[in-house]
Amino acid sequence: MNASFMYHNLGIREQECTKEEYQGGKTILHIRTKKKHICCPQCGSRHIICSGKTVRDIRGVPIGSRQIILRMSIQRVECKECGCIRNEEVKFTRGKRRYTRGFERLIHDLSKMGTISDVARFLDVSWDTVKDVQKEYLGRHYGHPSLKQVRRIGIDEFAVAKGHVYMTIVVDMDTGRVIYVGDGKGADALDGFWDRVKRAGCSIESVATDLSQAFVSSVQDNLPSAALVFDHFHVVKLMNDKLDKIRRATYQKEHDENSRRVVRGQRWILLCNGEELDESGQQRLQAALQANRPLAKAYYLKEALRRVWRQRSKEDADAVLDDWIRQASESDVAILRGMADTIVKHRNGILAWYDHRTSTGKIEGINNKIKTMKRQAYGFRDMDFFKLKILSLHDSTYAFSG
């Protein structure tokens, strides 16, 4: 077979074809390394003795619909210079793999357009082969993300599966890269990340996170000089949870059936942004608020809390937050007084948003991508592979379907 054809179509430059076979839909090419290219795989010396050979079948890039099998005669060489006795190096494949580098690249390209099962079925290889090629590729390119330029990070957890199985991700808030994936959602989930931060010597200025005490303590212990920024989405969500708890308590305590009917089924009306309600929604909201004073107090405090992040300056926000804490603390509703204590405890982190203007909104978007990826793949059995897929999410150029 023509050497130019073998090089340009199969990526083979040091071997020659000695025989061709055609079996069914396969083309089998018997190849061997040209004598002038055989050398010691350890020191590169050509002062060697060939002492036997083995035969290995290697998948090459298909031509049309025909599979290409490279039946390679691999020489075993003994080096007179260094004494090494080993099989010759086959440069068009990696190690002892049974597919060429070109076949790997084909799998990479096809994986951007279909699932692992689709690619395996099209190329007539095993599912594990496609997964292993993807995993190795992702490990080489994304397995060790650089932390040198990282200045602002965000931390959040997400559910991997039912049964309280979680993972924690750390995101570079400036680039949107996932730079770490840890098991669990406690402080120990970040231990590996803090080790990498110390080794990299990076200077992290701010950390955006939710109100999780585990994350807060971990950040304070490992980055004492970094500013903690509590995401406004999680603060408002916590207030929404308190409001819903008051709504349920109101419904259970109410004995008048008409009042119970007004409160029942109003969860969405109470929790959504009041500015977005239409006229009908406003009427239903007012009816629910008039039915119970503690519920009305909680609702108006929930709406007022949003104003903290709408001020012109940190000083104005501080004044608004002071007023909110005073109203909640003076309330005769125990749940609201407890919420006031929580806000006081996290006050500096809430106001730090005006200094760093960062939130976990970008991370919530990444979490949605992870959920979509899990649905497309129908779950992941290999957690290391799953983590590598997460680390590559930011790069759409190399995104694999699943």
Image: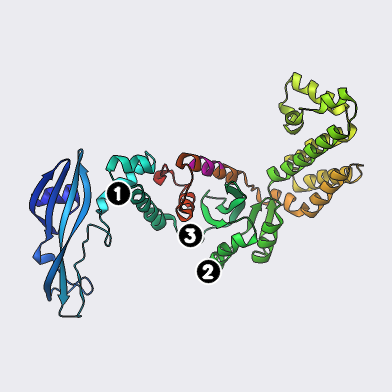
Residue placed at 38% from the left, 50% from the top? 131
Q: Is residue 70 left or right of residue 374?
A: left
Image x and y of residue 342, in percent: 80, 51
Image x and y of residue 323, in percent: 86, 44
On the image, numbered disc 3 is attached to which residue?
A: 146
Residue placed at 22% from the left, 61% from the top? 91
Decide whether residue 200 is among the magenta residues. Answer: no
Q: Earlier in the sequence, mark 2 or mark 3?
A: 3
Q: Earlier in the sequence, mark 1 or mark 3?
A: 1
For disc 2, the neighbor class at 10 Å (few under 14, some 14 to 19, many from 20) is few
Decide whether residue 371 is among the magenta residues. Answer: yes
Image height check: is 95 above or below 258? below
Asked if the residues shown at circle 1 and circle 3 are in contact, with their CB atoms under 8 angstroms apart, the answer is no
Examine the residues drawn in magenta and state their main secondary structure.
helix
Q: Is residue 47 left or right of residue 280?
A: left
For disc 3, the neighbor class at 10 Å (few under 14, some 14 to 19, many from 20) is few
247, 139: nearer the viewer: 247
Residue placed at 56% from the left, 62% from the top? 193
Name the residue type under label 1: Arg
- Which range is magenta? 368-373
Name the residue type under label 3: Ser
Image height check: is 334 above or below 279? below
> Does the rendering let one see residue 96?
yes
Residue 199's mark?
2
Q: Is residue 88 left or right of residue 111?
A: left
Q: Earlier in the sequence, mark 2 or mark 1?
A: 1
Image x and y of residue 10, in percent: 19, 49
Q: Quadrant of the C terminus?
A: top left
Image x and y of residue 258, in percent: 87, 22
On the image, numbered disc 1 is attached to which residue?
A: 105
